[in-house]
Image (cartoon, rainbow, N blue to C red):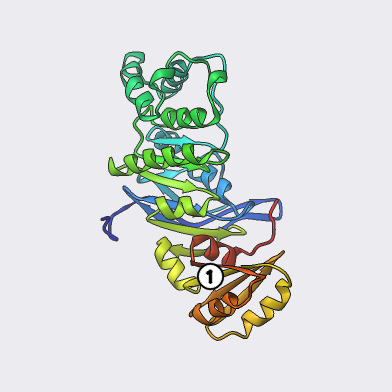
């Protein structure tokens, strides 16, 4: 268990980034301790990708302070990046090279000797489940294989910190679970992970702590369990069937139901005591109710809203 007093390996204080009149990052502050997985969550346009670029020294902030592994960013960003691995949203693998050659070329970007990279390649391929694909061209790989190769590539320099920008987007459930297992292995080895994701179940599984940002500002920060306990009612009943507005009205007047939202044909009833509403649903053969525990997605939607973001 990490000590709350452990020195942060990522320290962000009052970070500001402005594009024209748009404050993409607006006074953002958070810290990440060594050996933890820290989630940075938010809807599209919330400032997550901009924050990652600022942390890597690829963009100049207008205000605030960043320290990465004790180094000031962007002043010593090049030195810090040598100790970091990055899994971007797009794989950007070279189609002209084989799987092993992609790892070799990437290792040379860090100034590694070819012999040292070659020694690391078998372990990296085994880690990624690509031991039999060493000589395959990138075009021969599935989407899941490419994503795992991108993860292996990010580890070629044995980094202390991994930046993962939506690492499982577009993958099938089997590929997602395999990548989750690999990330858990890295955490057991003492790696630090900064994760952005739109999958709330992914954040709940992997992150010891997380921050939710919107419009460039921090709006909540804690462990997943603490955020759920603090921000949302403990039980949710989803009601599907005819006359959703009538059921929404009925749910709002039912004891134990604290809050009701209607999205299309579905009513979401957030309950401190679900039993009265559940009993009413059982007596109606037309509608269908699903009772479940509140989760991180409920918290996310409550704090950031349900409107689509482009």
Residue at the (57%, 66%) spot, across then down: 303
Residue at the (41%, 22%) spot, across then down: 107
Decide if residue 65 is in sight here: no
Residue at the (31%, 47%) spot, across then down: 35
Decide if residue 124 is in sight here: yes
Describe residue 220's horizontal placement relative to residue 244 as left or right: left
Quadrant in the rendering for residue 237: bottom right
**Location of residue 48 in the rendering, given as x and y in whole percent from the top left corner:** 56, 50
**Location of residue 158 in the rendering, given as x and y in whole percent from the top left corner:** 34, 31
Element carrying mark 1: strand
Describe residue 38's horizontal placement relative to residue 34 as left or right: right
Q: Nearer the viewer, residue 258 or 210?
A: 258
- Mark 1 burial class by Cα count in 10 Å: few <14, some 14-19, many 20+: many
Q: Which residue has dot 1 on it?
A: 236
| 310 up-or-down from 214: above or below | above
**Location of residue 59 in the rendering, given as x and y in whole percent from the top left corner:** 56, 42
Describe residue 156's horizontal placement relative to residue 220 as left or right: left
| 43 up-or-down from 111: above or below | below
Identify the image quadrant of the N terminus: bottom left
Count of marks, rendered view: 1
**Location of residue 110 in the rendering, given as x and y in whole percent from the top left corner:** 41, 25
Q: Nearer the viewer, residue 193 or 171?
A: 171
Q: Nearer the viewer, residue 257 or 29?
A: 257
């Amino acid at each position: 268990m990490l000590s709350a007093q452990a020195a942060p390996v990522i320290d962000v204080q009052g970070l500001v980034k402005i594009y024209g009149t748009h404050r993409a990052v607006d006074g953002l502050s958070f810290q990440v301790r060594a050996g933890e997985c820290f989630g940075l969550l938010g809807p599209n346009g919330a400032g997550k990708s901009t924050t990652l670029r600022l942390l890597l020294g690829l963009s100049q902030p207008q205000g605030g302070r960043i320290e990465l592994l004790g180094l000031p960013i962007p002043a010593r960003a090049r030195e810090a990046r040598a100790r970091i691995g990055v899994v971007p949203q797009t794989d950007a693998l070279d189609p002209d090279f084989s799987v092993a050659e992609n790892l070799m070329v990437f290792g040379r970007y860090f100034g590694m000797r070819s012999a040292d990279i070659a020694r690391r390649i078998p372990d990296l391929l085994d880690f990624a489940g690509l031991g039999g694909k060493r000589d395959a061209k990138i075009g021969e790989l599935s989407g899941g294989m490419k994503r795992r190769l991108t993860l292996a590539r990010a580890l070629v320099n044995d980094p202390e910190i991994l930046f993962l920008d939506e690492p499982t987007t577009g993958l099938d459930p089997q590929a997602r679970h395999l990548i989750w297992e690999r990330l858990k292995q890295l955490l057991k080895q003492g790696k630090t992970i900064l994760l952005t994701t739109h999958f709330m179940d992914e954040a709940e599984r992997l992150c010891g702590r997380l921050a939710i940002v919107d419009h460039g500002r921090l709006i909540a920060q804690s462990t997943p369990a603490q955020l759920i306990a603090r921000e949302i009612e403990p039980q949710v009943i989803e009601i599907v069937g005819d006359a959703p507005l009538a059921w929404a009205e009925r749910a709002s007047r039912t004891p134990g139901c604290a809050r009701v939202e209607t999205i299309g044909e579905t009513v979401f009833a957030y309950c401190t005591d679900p039993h009265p509403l559940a009993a009413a649903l059982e007596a109606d053969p037309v509608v269908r109710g699903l009772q479940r525990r509140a989760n991180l997605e409920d918290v996310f939607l409550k704090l950031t809203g349900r409107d689509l973001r482009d």
